[in-house]
Image: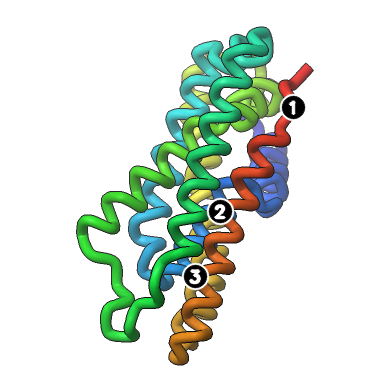
Amino acid sequence: MSLDLYLAFVLTSAVVLAIPGPTILYVTGCALSHGRRSIWATAPGVALGDLLAMSCALLGMGALLTASAELFTLLKWGGAAYLIWLGLKSWQASPAAPATRACTPRQSRTLFAQAFVITALNPKSIAFFVAFLPQFVRHGEPLGPQFALLVPTFVVLAVVNATLYGLLAGAVRERARDPRTMRALNRVGGGALIGAGLMTALMRRPA
């Protein structure tokens, strides 16, 4: 793969990732609700989720989602309901005292699993990878080395992007001291998750 093509892939990926979607709204919602330390749990979940989604795309899952309206709808509504449920829980959560904001190991495992599921099972992402990756692949060259370069690059960019969003939201959370402000941030985080769920519900099957 030429350097120009690789740099074009990096730039295009960065632009696409910078546009907030369900995963980013989940990460920022967690950071607003739990603080910036939640990034240590959500970022690895995003990485593993994107890795699985891209692998599924390479194995033909994206083509199947594009062809099957029933499967796309099932994943879409399942993901939307899950995000809205998480948002409602965050909305109703009591504000944590400043000394107890850090995530417990159990909470970290939960955030990791949720970030993974939301990222990996986003049907639009799998279908997107099917349309996106081939534009940067030279079919006259061995595919294995190209995929071995492009997939980790995208995953790293996705983690950096999610981390930056999470740190920004976490910085807002860390400045909160008043319980009313903290409750408001919980509700903003919950609203972000509900918004992510609605965004997922409004997805259309790729043509």
26 lies above or below 205? below
Q: Earlier in the sequence, mark 2 or mark 1?
A: 2
Mark 3 or 2, nearer chain start: 3
Amino acid at pointer 3: Asn
In the image, 205: left or right of 177? right
Residue at label 2? 193
Which mark lies nearer to you, 1 or 3? 3
Tell me which residue sits at (43%, 46%) in the image.
115
Label 2 sits on what residue type? Leu
- Front residue (pair 188, 125): 188
Rendered location of residue 50, percent (x, y): 49, 37
Label 1 sits on a secondary structure element that is loop
Residue at which label 1 appears: 204
Question: Which is nearer the N-term, disc 1 or disc 3?
Answer: 3
Q: Which residue is mark 3?
A: 186
Query: Few, some or many C-alpha atoms within 10 Å of disc 3 (few <14, some 14-19, many ≥20)?
Result: many
Could you tell me if the residues under marks 1 and 3 are in contact, i.e. CB atoms within 8 Å?
no
